[in-house]
Image (cartoon, helix red, strand yellow):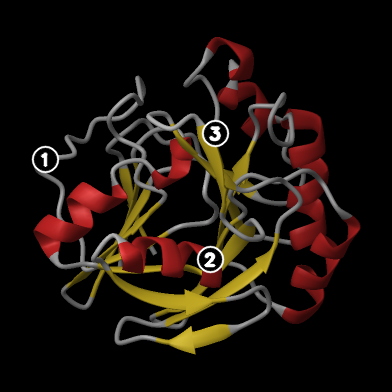
Amino acid sequence: MKISFHGHSVVKIQTGGKTILIDPFINGNSTTDLKADEVEADYIILSHGHNDHVGDTVEIAKRSNATVIGTAEIATYFGWKGLNTHPLNIGGSFKFDFGTVKLTQAFHSSSYTDEESQQLIYMGMPAGILLKIEGKTIYHAADTSLYSDMKLLKEFENIDLAFLPIGDNFTMGPDDALVAAEWIGAKMVVPVHYNTFPVIEQDPHDFVSRLKSAEGRVLTPGEEIEL
């Protein structure tokens, strides 16, 4: 299984001939190496409805015939847009042909901004994403603050790889993310959601240098690891 980071919170997973994209914010993402009109996907998983995570979902899904996985509200909205969708909700899981997806809690907000109408569209609860693929467990915390129930992930899951936000301002900052890394007990931690905008500028190398138990990896956009 190949896993790559593509700036902000964009993660791509390639496994068994399938490509999964998480939060494909490409156009407008100054840190990505991807091009929205070229990237392909079989599945798109959305953690929540903010524009910097929904990103280019509609364009990619229509061109690739990808299935969009997200909360019931997200699935309903993009179903109205003509996309193939699969609804989940917090705590629920489903076994797809590439592996199992489960949505976890995330403490954040979730709405989609329609710039033409200047309306905020409710997109349900925000979520973290727990994936079990090829016998490995991957946790994408998405946009969240630090919250005590993260400790349950260490109790009930054996996380091989975790993507944790460190940008602060909108999500956990580096100090809280260090606590989260200890609480979830992941073997490897990759920082995400930083340096895309001035208000979330952080030093990811400093963050990984301060990890106590997990191996830290700073991935440049487009860099991949094998799990």
- The relative height of residue 167 versus residue 144 in the rendered view (above or below) is above
- The relative height of residue 46 versus residue 4 in the rendered view (above or below) is below
Q: Is residue 216 left or right of residue 225?
A: right
**What amino acid does circle 2 point to?**
Glu
Q: Is residue 213 left or right of residue 56?
A: right
Q: CA distance from mark 2 to mark 3?
A: 23 Å
**What amino acid does circle 3 point to?**
His
Instruction: Give coordinates of residue 223: x percent, y percent.
Output: 30, 39
For marks 1 and 3 on the same chain, the one whose residue lies earlier in the sequence: 1
For marks 2 and 1 on the same chain, the one whose residue lies earlier in the sequence: 1
**What amino acid does circle 1 point to?**
Asp
Instruction: Give coordinates of residue 114: x percent, y percent.
Output: 44, 36
Snapshot quadrant of residue 222: top left
Q: Which residue bears the numbered disc 2?
A: 73
Residue that extends furthest to the right in the rendered view of this protein: 148
Q: CA distance from mark 2 to mark 1?
A: 26 Å
Q: Which residue bears the numbered disc 3?
A: 193
Badge 2 local density, few (<14 within 10 Å), some, or many (20+)? some
Of circles 2 and 3, the one toward us is: 2
Q: Residue at x 48, y 62 (%)?
A: 74
Query: Contact, CB < 8 Å: mark 2 with mark 3?
Result: no
Q: Which residue bears the numbered disc 1?
A: 37
Instruction: Give coordinates of residue 177: x percent, y percent.
Output: 74, 40
- The relative height of residue 177 versus residue 118 in the rendered view (above or below) is below
